[in-house]
Image: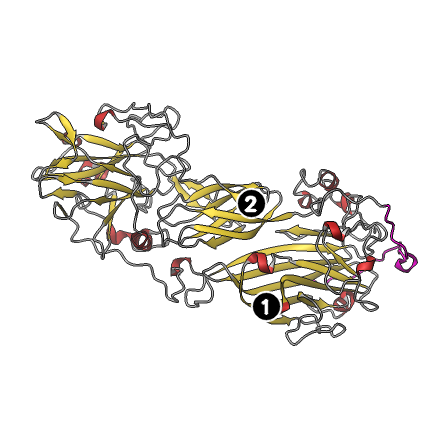
Amino acid sequence: MKTKIVSTGIIVFIAILIGCTDKDMSKTPPPGDGNAFDYRTANNITANVNYSVPEGYALAFEAYAEDPIEIVNDEPVKKEGLKTLFKGITDNDGNYSELVQIPASIKEVYLYTDALGVPSVIKYSINGTQVKSKSVSSRTGETDYIYSTRPSELKIVNDGKWNVKGVPNYLGAPKNVSSDGLKMVNSSLGTKSDNVDNYIAESGEANINIVKDGAIIDLVVVHNSGNTVTNTMGYYYYDSQKPPRSVEDIQKIVLFPNATFAPKAGLQLGDNVRLKYWDEATQSWIDQFPKGITIGWFILVGGFNSTSYAISQPDTWKVYAYSNTELNDLQRKHNVIVRDPNTKIRYIGFEDKNFHQADYRDFIFYIEADPSYVEYNDDNIPDGKDLTDSDGDGVPDVDDEFPDDPLLAYTIKYNGTVAFEDIWPYQGDYDMNDVVMEYNTIHYLNARNLIVKVKDVWTLKNNGAQYTNGFAYQYETSSSMIRSMNITSDYTIPTRFSLNSKGLENNQTKATIILFDDAEDVVKTGKDMVFTVETTLGGMKSSELGLPPYNPFIIVESDKQRGREVHLPNHKPTDLMDMSLLHYGHDLSEPAKGLYFISNNYFPFAIHIVGTSFDFPKEGQRIDEAFPQYTRWATSNGTENLEWYKHKK
């Protein structure tokens, strides 16, 4: 049910604008060139995102104000009900750069993706006008390979060592992992897949048999799920004719002391190690495996100690998991195999838990070997499946909010409130309720992160003014870039102002939408005061359209004139503003410096509250009285009490 708003406010003091005929040029404006504190509660900044991925591997991601992963039953689970700050789709090189809106109180964001091959969560800092992070693929400072402490049953080839992140000093040069292969594994083992059980390997099926002398085996890292435990991963080998019956029958050899992705640890997509075979004749480790040997795999759950940098001794919780299931507690199956039907590459996934729901994404790798030297035991495992993209827009159905519409891929939602004082250019009563508008906006974007449709829903929440005031807003783009615009409301669309065939205001360089020309008239109708504006575009970047609430403004005394506009601080007036009204009274606008609708007493003429409804002050109550934290926020230039609007007295 929507509540009808009744206008009861009467402004006692009335400033007579007509009596002011001269500008007071002696007024001292705020310092700067347009960057003076503008009372914003949100910042429009550029998000520069880069994932280190192979060419052709675009991925979808979401940004949050907190770590979206929580631990449930010792498993990492994505939290429910979190509000998305922004989201997007990278290009085929893993890059994304767009204008986004972040509440001013937020100083860091967490990027989440369920795509394989990259960390599931990366923390980005907000640095001035950018969202930026050190590249997670950087290994700058990863030196001092001095650690080697481990249980006695674990071998390290050639006295290998590792650093504080568990990255060993015997990695090969990074390998290029196939983007098509990653997509295929994503489809088969992704968090939204429902057929993981089809790929579970029976005992030994994930192993590799050497059928020709001289086999060279490289293990290539594909993924780590961002699991909460830092596992140790390695291999063992045995006579193919004599499978092990107990753990005493095998020698475990460490490959990765810490098989965990950055930023928690140091592994990344394409890391690899060449497996070694102990040659009894030469008493040395060699690269070539002889015929008749089978290689299996293990992980030591939670094996790497991030404090001592040692591989821990097994205990009740730190247990081994093997690809030969008869070696496991309860003979649990810890592996899946996803076979690429085109390249025949086998992607092997490990599950590190015994008692919880398995996703087999705790460590994923594949083996690179000459196929004439090796054989596999996975004939009973089905081939992996390709990602489905029903509409052919390049976004897989699992990531596409509109899987059957090639013009749409996803949405971004915004909400907030704008409130105005209409006695500008003079100081009013500062109750910030003369015109209060709440907005809920949806941007519809395509696979290239271009906005193709907009739905702006505006609700008049209060009219506390004595003037006749209209309300409008302006996009950053020109009217010619708007394909169509339609307003739906119970209130009759105004005819006082001149509109073009699209319903946009005439004689404006930028697309300007007028919702009503008399707030009091809207209230008197007794109807739902909601205005739904649907706009179609040819496809444009957020920086070209602008971000909500765009450039909202009221038209003061709209029954007498069109040129008296009140905007948010440092938002430019429209082409139809009477510019001679600027710099009168208490207004310190300096267009040459980019300063608009600025005062010097810490009270703006309009304010934007982002991400929440604004419990505006009652009639005649100053905003600093209603919100005790407001004054400190304003006098600190927005560096303190950034969420003052959530603490009403």
Task: List the residue tagged with mark 2.
Answer: 130
Residue 471: percent from left, percent from top: 73, 63
Our reading of the magenta stretch's main secondary structure is loop
Residue 394 place in picture, x, y as percent = 39, 61
Tell me the quadrant of the picture where the N terminus can be found. bottom right
Say which of 324 and 206 sits in front: 206
Q: CA distance from mark 1 to mark 2?
A: 27 Å
Amino acid of disc 2: Gln
**Residue 93 image point, x, y percent:** 40, 51
Mark number, residue 481: 1
Q: Position of residue 578 (x, y in %)?
A: 80, 62
For this view, does 129 lie left or right of residue 180? Answer: right
The residue that appears at 27% across and 52% down in the rendered structure is 197
- State which quadrant residue 559 falls in: bottom right
Q: Amino acid at mark 1?
A: Met
- For the image, the number of numbered tags is 2
Q: Secondary structure at mark 1?
A: helix
